[in-house]
Amino acid sequence: MMTPRVAVLSGFGINCETETMAVFEMSGAHADRVHVNRLVNGDLNLSDYQIMAIPGGFSFGDHLGSGRLMGNRLRFGLRDQVRGFVRDGKPVIGICNGFQVLVKMGLLPGDKEVSLTQTASLALNDSGHYENRWATLEFDSKSPCIWTAGLERIRVPVRHGEGKFVTDDPTLMDKWAESGQLVARYVDPSTEYPSASDNILPYPISPNQSWRNVAGVCDPTGLVFGLMPHPEANHSTWLGATWTREDNEHGQGEGLAIFHNAVSHLMDA
Amino acid sequence: MSSGEHVRIFEVTTKDLEGLPDSRGETVRSMLKTDHGIKVDSVRVIMGYQVRSTISDAQAETLTYDLFADPVIEVAKTGSRILDDFSEAPEVAIQIGFKPGVTDNTAQAGLDGLTTLFPEQKEARVATYRTYAFWGVEGTVSPSELAATLHNPMIERASMSDRNGCLKGHWPELGFPDVPPNIFKEPTTIDLEVSDKDLLEISERGLLALNLEEMKAIQGHYRNPAVRAERTDQGLQSDRPTDAELECLAQTWSEHCSHKIFAAKIRHVDKTTHEDTTINSLFKTHIMQPTLDIQKEVDWLLSIFHDNSGVISWNDEWSVCIKAETHNSPSALDPFGGAITGIVGVNRDILGTGLGARPIANTDVFCFGPPDYSGTIPRGLFHPSRVFRGVHSGVRSGGNESGIPTVNGAIVFDERYIGKPLVFCGTVGIMPRTLADGRESHVKTPKPGDVVYMVGGRVGSDGIHGATFSSLELTEESPSSAVQIGDPITQKKMLDMILEARDEGLIQVITDNGAGGLSSSVGEMAELTGGAKLDLGQVPLKQAGLSSWEILVSESQERMTVGVRPDDCEKFETLASLHEVEATAVGEFTDSGAFVVHHGQTPVAHLPIHFLFDGCPQLNLESEWSPPTHLPVETPELDEKGMGKLLTRLLARPNVASKEWWVRSYDHEVIAQSVIKPFCGTNHDAPGDAAVIAPIQGGTQGLVISNGIAPRYSDIDSYAMAAASVDEALRNAVCVGVDLDLIAGLDNFCWPDPIESSKTPDGRYKLAQLVRANRALDDVCRAYRLPCISGKDSMKNDAMMGGEKISVPPTLLFSLLGNHEDVRKAVSSDFKKPGDAIFLVGETHQELGASELAFMLRDEGSGGIGGAVPEIEPERNMTVYRALTSSMKSGLVSSAHDCSDGGLAVALAECCFGADSGASIDISPLQSDCSSLDVWGALFGESLGRILVSVRPTDKEAFEESMEGVCCHYLGQVSEGDAISVSRDGEKVLLGSMSEMRDSWKDTLHGGGL
């Protein structure tokens, strides 16, 4: 297939669009910066794109809960375009604030009907404040998630104040675990793969004290994926937290594989 | 209130779920304990939204969980109070909301969300409050004491309910913060044909901050027959200024905007050398001239001193710029608002550079009183811990929400900053060298006829008199209107829009609206074309009824002024509307020679450009230097373990201690460019030196950003202070491998008032300190070929509170922006592996005067701070720096960390923290630098030009070879285990546990909680 086109959303305080576009370009896709209002006013149409990415940032300043107001803009202003995109089986990723948007608008963990009903949330970190620190993620090898297929662990920065994954119906956690939707979890880097566990790891290995150490989830199809950490911020080895202590050759960073996966998924289809 | 309009209240709090704490409440509990020593068992926080609208009950139902509350983790109520629902009534309940007219960003977002759901509710208004419910409050703590810790009465209101009230369900309740209507005052004129005393009275009463000579210059202008004739033609009263004119002149001529002290003619007398000279402008002589001289030798200095920031060429495709500013007075009055306004304000300086640059990195340097200060705080001031928390929180919000990483900074503590904290906010920007239409982006290209747009926020009564207010000392009467709260999201939308407009070639000229508001922004740009006209009637207002002069000088935030060609206006406005940014044509550039202001049909001001910008008379000042005297440093007798303990205590001094708890809450990695981050080491907790960023995605060319600040030395000699600041900035940059052929600097002076007067009897001495600091800056920058490309000064950092005057120590912040040829060769400060060889490069001398050690020993009760301050030998340092950076390029250096506060001993400990290791060194070789060097000088002296380096054992010889001819001592090795051990002449002089030191270093400034 031809080079996939990625709609990287921008506007209203989204602020990671530059690097999010860069990682898709590095992965062989073509990325456009798409102001949300260009989709609302009909200048552009989501259906002309093969991937949608909602980057990190502080949409609407995180006021009234992170992702809430941007989620509403999409849920009420772009409802049909967004549902159509997901029902067409096109990959979607939300990173950090973008993940919060996807959860608040009900696309994640989501349901087969794409009903846009919110079932989980990202609460204030137990520390009560925003933090920027590095964490290690481990991926569920049995997950249907196309974004993380074949990946075991990556090191990534987390940069958020509201990243504690929770729900008000604990049985849902079992259901999502069963279906491989709790795909990305914080792990202790000193352990052997696989070691993801349901017991909440100590701070700061789990920076936000998320339930079951969840860092990212996918929808039942595995095409819609969101995570709090920033894989796009580790696109090159020299952006790592401890690269000056390591003797590896310089090149692609550990986070890039996620974006490669989505592009390959489309190219190989 | 229109028909059907009502105020409805929505309240939201965290749902009771196992595994979901009320972290907002927990944060308050922890803050009360850490900052105020107040113990409470638990705190709950309820968010309240007051909505004035015509929504129906059904719509309110929708809003509850579709807008205000998260249906999964929160519970919400409309129409009744959540306080009623707790199973056990709280002991104290406090409600905090903003005062009318204060910016409420959450409310603004709420209104946006409301109109997303119900677009017809455009006239709705939203306000917010927070209610705090307390249980298990210590008996002696009153509700009003608790309330005092939670709000700032200057901008916020509080309502509270005590134990009795709570039991009866009498809850605190704040009404909707209605802004009283402004009463439009017709423009007036001011008669200046009065006595000198009355002229001064006019200045003081109007908060104009103009002195007699300046008032007389204005008086003279209006006596000029030609001026009078022109004014008659314009329909203005011929012989006297309008209120708007006088305000506009006061803003433009304020110390804040026109830097009168740096432009002054100074007679400088030195009592020790008997020098008696006249300096015609410190700025021109010692800051601008060295840069102009360097500019003759290099081709990369693109735009210096005249724009909002200095611009240098980085490579053929990109230029970069840097600017730092202070926001001291507003941060003293409202730490959060002052700081957030500071950071988003300096971001606008970058956006307003050339045709618009993109801000890509922030740096923040703060000077506060000690956070553990136990003395009395003068009335009208906040305790330093509260200033610290508020400023930090403001800068965090401003930087993080704008998507600009905070990559570097420093926090300095001294009791004299209790009077005025110093809050330096710096920003680095990047722009393409040329735009698609071929224009160089660092050059503004306005033409007469271009339309003047005001873009971004609206004008309100907030922020009137900021520029003149900051040109006065802080007093109990300082106006609250000088305090504002920045709105990063409004600004971010504007920034996105402006950069798109730039790339489409729609911008001819741009500047930000900071100090002095439209009067400064339009006035300054009018200087470029030779005139401008402005219609205040077109300016969008936050509330009706503002008087003409208020609209002209209001410093309401998040506004840029942009010049657009008439043909491009439609495109420009379409782009603005796409981004939901307000852009309004308010005037036109002309070549009439005057800045002409109307309010609708009414003429309001007519100011000749040359008088506005060149009419301010030069100050004549007197300066006299005689060195101060201090008791000498007294060092104790200690064995090696005692020395280890002493180092552990030194590491716990706030100036040295880890700032990690605070710095972690700044985003330092957005834009995916941070190569050398604020923290390094195996546990990511060792302090970095300079920041290195690779701003082009995937590119390996980098930028280095560093800061130097050393106010302690001003107590002995401000020459040493300034020299140490410049050297520290460069030294830090050298530690990461900066390209020494492409480095540029910024000078930010923060001084106490140096003009002799009855309030400042020691003005001559303070001015002599300024002269000496400028001379050091000149000498060192020339030797380092480090041109200052922009800078700023803040010259009234005094507080007069309850009859007591507190002046800050003379402080120079020097910030550096440099090139890095290949970020893959960048070096971090942490030791890497046991067995690595440790070297100290640069000479060590017996220089303990005003050192951190001297202050610690004095604070512990012995001796003073007197003694030799570090003397700079810039040529020698530069040779060392060149050798070291070239050795880094060859990949021979494993780690490099600068020696500053606390000297070699502190640097050694910090390098060990990063490797979880010990170290064993021998300092005997240092005696060859200086015969009088004792153990104290060697370990804790702060001689300049020194960097602690480690190299792989296999590279030891090659490294030594690469350093041949410069001072470089082999000291020892990184070791396994926990012991840091130092010997001299075969005797152990210091022995301590690295992990104990690290705990001590991390504990002091831990902010509480996780």
Image (spheres, helix red, strand yellow):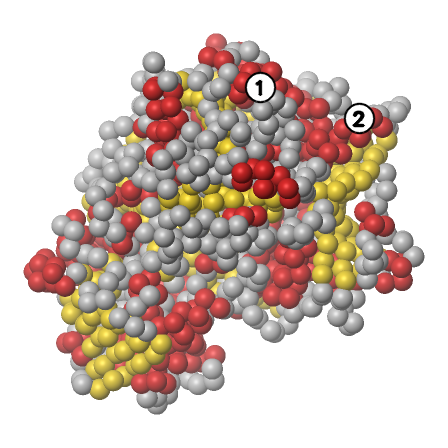
User: Mark 1: which secondary structure?
Assistant: helix
Residue B741 x/y as whole percent: 20, 45
Give the residue drawn at x 32%, y 52%. Answer: A242
Q: Nearer the viewer, residue B565 or A143?
A: A143
Residue, far right = B168
Residue B213 shows in this picture = no
> Does A177 sit left or right of B966 as displayed?
right
Task: Indicate whether A238 appears above or below B423.
Answer: above
Inspect the image, locate mark 2, and give the three-letter code of the amino acid beneath it. Gln
Q: Residue at x 63, y 62 (%)?
A: B30
Residue B147 in sight from this viewpoint: yes
Q: Mark 2 sits on what residue?
A: B59
Q: Position of residue A181 (x, y in %)?
A: 52, 36
Closest to the observer, B1009 or A195? A195
Q: Measure how far apart labels 2 and 1 are at the Cα level.
A: 25 Å
Direction from residue B842 to residue B164 in the image, left or right: right
Q: Residue B927: x, y in percent?
A: 18, 78
Vertical side of B918 occupied by A140: above or below: above
Residue that label 1 marks: A83
- Taking the spot 47% from the left edge, 20% from the top edge, the residue there is A90
Q: Amino acid at mark 1?
A: Arg
Where does the C terminus of chain B fall, quadrant-wise? Answer: bottom right
